[in-house]
Image (cartoon, rainbow, N blue to C red):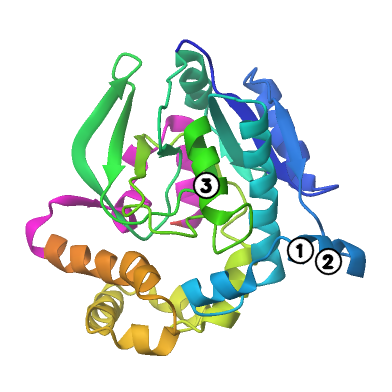
């Protein structure tokens, strides 16, 4: 199908990040199709609208904790976009958060009009943690782009290409309600969903590593060590290796499952499977580790390498 995917942007009212994204898209001569604005929840009435879409029992049974308002709001906005795609029968769409900085090569991707069929989803950027297969599933546009399939759950929700079938299935599976995080509120392998990543990365979250959702999650999820302490030890390779060693056996032993009180399906997909592959990959190096490719400049086009220089 020789039709370029339609670009849909997710933002908030009066977001300064949206204006920066619009300027970048204009410079690249990329037209966006539609903007969906989230509900800021500044009034009781606004918050009620968002919470009316929240299936608290299902979500909390799945992830083992209540979702924060911003988490629910982000998923609420995403559901609005999916509903629009299904109602208008849009075959392929790219859904982009407003903090994204697209590369010049992103324009090339849109122009090549790659058609994504079925229950599939493509990521344009992927932070840790998770693993991809090394085998190239598709080589596209004179081999400028390659698609590799995810071996484990990966975090690609900040910019993705989705199909009509995927959106329709997502709404059916969730019953058009917020049932968990947008990546994903169900087991993607069990549901037969194929997740792919484009190499090189074609976008970067231009937020200087700051995320309101991540800060909220760190409060409610209570990680093994604080984000502040981790930001210190990340510069000490030996300490980080020891920390990862301890963390691996913590999750493989299912000790984390006892504390998280989440569903078995969620724990296995988000934690056990990843650390099982991490342990296996330590000896075999069979899979692509997002912890490594995330900071490797060769996985970025020239105009995105500056972001790696900023943080590493």
Disc 3 and disc 2: Cα gap in Å?
Answer: 23 Å
Look at the image and give the residue range highlighted in magenta: 283-311
Q: Decide: marks 2, 1 in contact (CB < 8 A)?
A: yes
**Residue at the farthest top position:** 2
Q: Residue at x 43, y 54 (%)?
A: 127
Q: Which residue bears the numbered disc 2? A: 48
Q: Which residue bears the numbered disc 1? A: 52
**Residue 170, numbered label:** 3
Q: Main secondary structure of the magenta part?
A: helix
The answer to which of marks 3 and 2 sits earlier in the sequence is 2
Indicate the quadrant containing the N terminus: top left, top right, bottom left or bottom right.
top left
Q: Position of residue 266 (x, y in %)?
A: 39, 69
Indicate the quadrant containing the C terminus: top left, top right, bottom left or bottom right.
bottom left
The answer to which of marks 3 and 1 sits earlier in the sequence is 1
Image position of 189 with respect to 303: above or below: below
Q: Position of residue 209 (x, y in %)?
A: 56, 59
């Amino acid at each position: 199908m020789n039709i370029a995917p339609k670009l849909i942007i997710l933002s908030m009212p009066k977001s300064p990040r949206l204006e920066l994204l619009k300027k970048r898209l204009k410079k690249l001569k990329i037209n966006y199709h539609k903007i969906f604005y989230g509900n800021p929840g500044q009034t009781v009435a606004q918050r009620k609208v968002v919470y009316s879409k929240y299936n608290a029992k299902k979500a909390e049974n799945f992830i083992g904790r209540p979702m924060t308002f911003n988490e629910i709001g982000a998923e609420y906005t995403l559901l609005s976009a999916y509903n629009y795609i299904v109602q208008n029968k849009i075959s392929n769409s790219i859904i982009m958060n407003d903090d994204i900085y697209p590369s010049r090569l992103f324009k090339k991707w849109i122009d090549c009009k790659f058609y994504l069929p079925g229950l599939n989803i493509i990521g344009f950027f992927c932070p840790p943690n998770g693993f991809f297969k090394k085998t190239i599933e598709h080589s596209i546009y004179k081999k400028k782009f390659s698609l590799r399939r995810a071996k484990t759950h990966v975090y690609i929700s900040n910019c993705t290409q989705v199909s009509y079938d995927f959106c329709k299935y997502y709404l059916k599976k969730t019953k058009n309600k917020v049932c968990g995080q947008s990546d994903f509120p169900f087991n993607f392998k069990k549901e037969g969903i194929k997740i792919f990543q484009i190499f090189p990365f074609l976008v970067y979250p231009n937020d200087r590593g700051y995320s309101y959702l991540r800060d909220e999650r760190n409060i409610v999820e209570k990680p093994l060590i604080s984000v502040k302490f981790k930001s210190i030890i990340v510069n000490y390779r030996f300490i980080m290796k020891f920390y990862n060693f301890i963390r691996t056996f913590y999750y493989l032993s299912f000790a984390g499952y006892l504390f998280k009180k989440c569903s078995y399906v969620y724990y296995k997909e988000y934690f056990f499977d990843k650390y099982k592959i991490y342990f296996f990959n330590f000896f075999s190096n069979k899979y692509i580790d997002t912890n490594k490719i995330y900071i490797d400049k060769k996985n970025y086009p020239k105009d995105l390498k500056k972001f790696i220089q900023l943080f590493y």
